[in-house]
Image: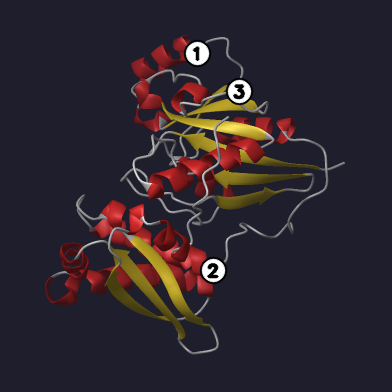
Amino acid sequence: MTRCGFIAIAGRPNAGKSTLLNRLVGQRIAITSHKPQSTRNRVVGLLTDESTQLVLLDTPGLLEPGDALHRSMRSTAVAAIREADLILHIADARDGAPPPLWEVAAWDGRPPNARVLVALNKMDALAPAQRDALAAAVAGRDHVFFISARTGEGLEPLLARLRAEIPEGPFHYPADDASTADLRFIVAEIVREVALEQLDDEVPHALACQVEEFRESRTPVYIRAVLYVERETQKRIVIGAGGERIREVGRRARARIEPLVGSQVYLDLWVKVLPNWRRDAGALRRLGYAVAEEPDK
């Protein structure tokens, strides 16, 4: 008998959802950043053992839509939650006992029937007295787990519960796969992740990345990627004085991409202006974002 289930990892921005996904899968497949709203697409991670396959759906942080990009992000998160067999609500333990997921999501209408487990993340950041207070606040709730995605604390009990809760059924994906994402998507996310690390708060939300060419037949592997921004001033910031910043982004991104590709990489980075792309449905489609918004009801 095997079990296989879709698990939506949901919660507020910056709760540590992508860090948890990467930790569980054992590979960097989802972008992580201290800047909120970094995850924009659904990223699927796979964790398979002899009898169970967890299909982990990392979702954008649940937030009130402010533009077309935010509507796309919320639609992506809502769709994953609706499809899931099980929902894992990730909350920052430093904020105390969280409200119900449906309140966090400002869900309008009847929520899905899938069971919700709660993982209070970043426990490593709490002092012993804070840990005790939090444990007292959620005492008696067997669906609440205390974890640190950064250190791995508390993940074994959580994994045991996830495996026990998913339905019986055949595996949906090959047992050796770690993700359903293709290499182009992962490379684009790595470039954007590194760029976010290098940039101030003025640019990150206006930054997108797309891989336009990927030639694995060449040595070194040739990858041309474009970082898109909305204004010329942002372009100058991303490039930096004398091109120094974009060269550093390329150097650091290449170091993360080469182990994935298994070869040396020539990363050809460009920065282009795509005015107001976050508010333009056509531009969002061009950049690979889902545009159609799922209703909450």
Looking at this view, is 278 or 133 the one in front? Answer: 278
Q: Is residue 205 visible?
A: yes
As drawn, the label of residue 138 is 1
Check the image and name the residue furthest to the right: 1
Residue at figure coordinates x 73%, y 35% from the top left: 166
Q: Quadrant of residue 253?
A: bottom left
As drawn, the label of residue 110 is 3
Residue at figure coordinates x 19%, y 52% from the top left: 202
Q: Quadrant of residue 225?
A: bottom left
N-term mark: 2 or 1:
1
Question: Is residue 66 depicted above or below 221 in this figure?
Answer: above
Looking at this view, is 123 or 73 the one in front? Answer: 73
User: Would residue 203 be found to the left or right of residue 290 on screen?
Assistant: left
User: Would residue 272 be found to the left or right of residue 82 on screen?
Assistant: left
Badge 1, how many Cα within 10 Å: few under 14, some, many 20+?
some
As drawn, the label of residue 71 is none
Q: Quadrant of residue 6?
A: top right
Q: Give the alpha-carbon distance from disc 2 to disc 1, as whole Å.
A: 41 Å
Q: Amino acid at mark 3?
A: Arg
Residue named by callout 2: 183
Q: Is residue 19 visible?
A: no
Give the secondary structure at mark 2: helix
Q: Give the alpha-carbon distance from disc 3 to disc 1, as whole Å.
A: 25 Å
